[in-house]
Amino acid sequence: MKSIIFIILLLSIDVYTQSAIRMDGFFDDWNSGVITHIDDTLDSQGVDLLDFSVCNDYEYLYLRIRLSEEIDLTETFYNPAEIYINIDTDNNSLTGYYTNNIGSEYGINFFDKFIFDDTNYPSVDTLSLYDLDVIPLPTYSSNEFEIAIDRSLFSDTICISIKENIGNDFMPNNGSVFTYVFDNNFIPFFPVTDFLKNDSMYLRLMTYNVWSNGLISNNRIDEHRRIFASANADIITYQECGNTTYNDVLAFLNTVPGNYPYIYPDLNSGNLTISKYPSLQSWQVAAKIDAELIDLPDSIYSKDILIINGHPPCCGNNQGRQEHFDALIQFINDAKTIGGVIDLPINTPISFSGDMNLVGYSEQYYTILNGTISDTSTYGVGGLPDWNNTPLKDQVAYFNEKNMAYTWDNPNSANYPPGRLDFVFFSNSVMSVDKSFIISTEHMGTTLLNQNNLQLNDTKFASDHFPIVVDFIIPMVNSIAGCIDPGACNYNPVAVIDDSSCVYSVLWQQALTICAGDSIAIGNSIYDTSGIFIDTVLYTGSCDTIFYSTLSLENNVASFDTLSTNNAILWNTMYLDSSGDYLYTLVNVNGCDSVAYLNLTVNLSNIQEFNKNKNKLVKVVDYLGKEVLFKTKNKPLFYIFDDGTIKKKIIIEK
């Protein structure tokens, strides 16, 4: 049976969709294609586990964990908590370490920052978090976290148990087991962000912690030269350059392409700002925060830009970081008002970039965004820092070829997992961003490396941080507002101010099954073979919808039987009393044809006279097998007797 199946593209269809998780410490992408377990409430002696969600791609297992209160995943916090994730990688409770009804091969201990290796239990080994490529975000405290774990050592069916150790809370609990089957029925999607500017007028910023004066380190300077050249930034904010003098920077710049005549080192803070354009004025905002008002060409740009370079205290010094960010907000509020140490022309773009060391209290992150000062007696009442009294924008950048936003990793640094420590904040009411990316050469393909004259281990050897590159769209003379994202359907190539009007194409991933011999229409295409297909469906006045389809074929089923009988028979609702070939078509559980064929031989000569056998009539039925009155007129009837014989008879009414 041939048929064509048409998908009505504007209606809901029952297909599999796989979320593309972006590892950035935010959760707006955890909205489809995930499985969620909800825990019992109030079953903890401490911080309560609320729920967890799971999904995967071809490389990682992703988990999202939510808790009742804010915690620090890897450090001591005022809400003490110790999170463990146990994974039964072979779905066998008899192997590994037995806990919470599963046999755990790997137990991830975030607070103590190591992994129990129970693959040869009772022999127990320990691994680094880097051995399973464990990536938890955000790096600062939160009441929810997303975690990526390399799945290459896992079978396709695993069991997961999550424990908060101090309160002795488990997910799942009450003797139940959470089993997860990896769904490999999706199309890997590899977004690539190239290094090229989409417009030469965009202002490119690079921020980079070069790790212990990397620009003058003889065994790392070549890597830094290649990274510097590949970024081709207009303004660079470096950190950890406390022993790198003006002459050292000049010597470095003489070995790289481009003209960077303006060098602003601060040997006390270790911050170094390099620019193609001069600074009109400099400020020391805090001990480790510096600011430069960069004089952009008046013939092109309608405003200059305030570049703030920061590297506040690290690690457990939460108070020191908070004081730096309080001072930052005081400085920005001063810049926006008349008087004080700085007066900026209204709507001057502001960028704050650097290694923020945001590894402790989340309060520090939200001070930068929202201007909420902690020490108001010293730094004032604070206030929303953008010109239109809104938060600053956190420009979340990702690797060029991977949806990862962490900017630091160092397996030798007390086993701390990768983290997002480096940031670019900016006043998005008066400027916008066209493109941003994190340069991580070890996560790049050969093509991208060769295009930018980079080597695979450049960022790995140069520093324990990764550079962030951001292309700002600065207001120009006679600038126009509109959609400034080239990836949007309504991109306006002459617009320089983002008016939040951008709309985007929809990407839809689906797995479909049809029967052999059938066809399926997707957009303007018709397919009748298995495979992976990409179709773009155009809609008038709107964006395109791009369908990534994985199509599978199910075979039709046939059965063949041969039968010889002395009697008429009932076969698939049909009464047969003559020899011949018969077929009957059914639909199987997959929705495909199941055809039964019968070769029948009937020997009517062997049918005995009914009255000689003195048999008894059981019932009378018609051709459809429906029982009728034995005196029914003018239609063929079958008289069925207790000895199995059948008599065909028609009573004709005259």
Image (cartoon, helix red, strand yellow):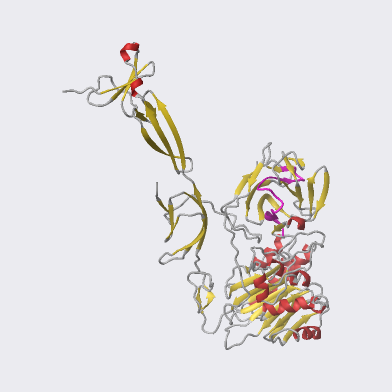
In front of the other: 177 or 372? 177
Is residue 409 placed above or below 65 in the rendered structure? below
Q: Position of residue 151 (x, y in %)?
A: 69, 53
Queried whether the magenta region covers residue 177, the answer comes back as: no
Q: Position of residue 71 (x, y in %)?
A: 72, 53
Query: The magenta stretch spans which residues?
Result: 140-169
Q: Position of residue 270 (x, y in %)?
A: 79, 76
Is residue 377 placed above or below 298 in the rendered structure? above
Circle count: 0
Queried whether the magenta region covers residue 162, the answer comes back as: yes
User: Which residue shows up at 59% across the image and 68% down it?
Assistant: 390
Is residue 105 placed above or below 279 in the rendered structure? above
User: Does the magenta stretch mainly form a helix, a strand or a loop?
Assistant: strand
In front of the other: 444 or 217? 444
Q: Position of residue 105 (x, y in %)?
A: 75, 46
Location of residue 306 by image quarter: bottom right
User: Which residue shows up at 80% across the image and 43% down it?
Assistant: 121
Q: Is residue 222 left or right of residue 622?
A: right
Location of residue 583 by image quarter: top left
- Can residue 352 be seen at all in this image of the molecule? yes
Q: Is residue 243 left or right of residue 61?
A: right
Looking at the rendering, in which quadrant would you find the C terminus? top left
Q: Is residue 178 left or right of residue 107?
A: left
In front of the other: 109 or 39? 109
In front of the other: 250 or 565? 565
- Can residue 340 be seen at all in this image of the molecule? no
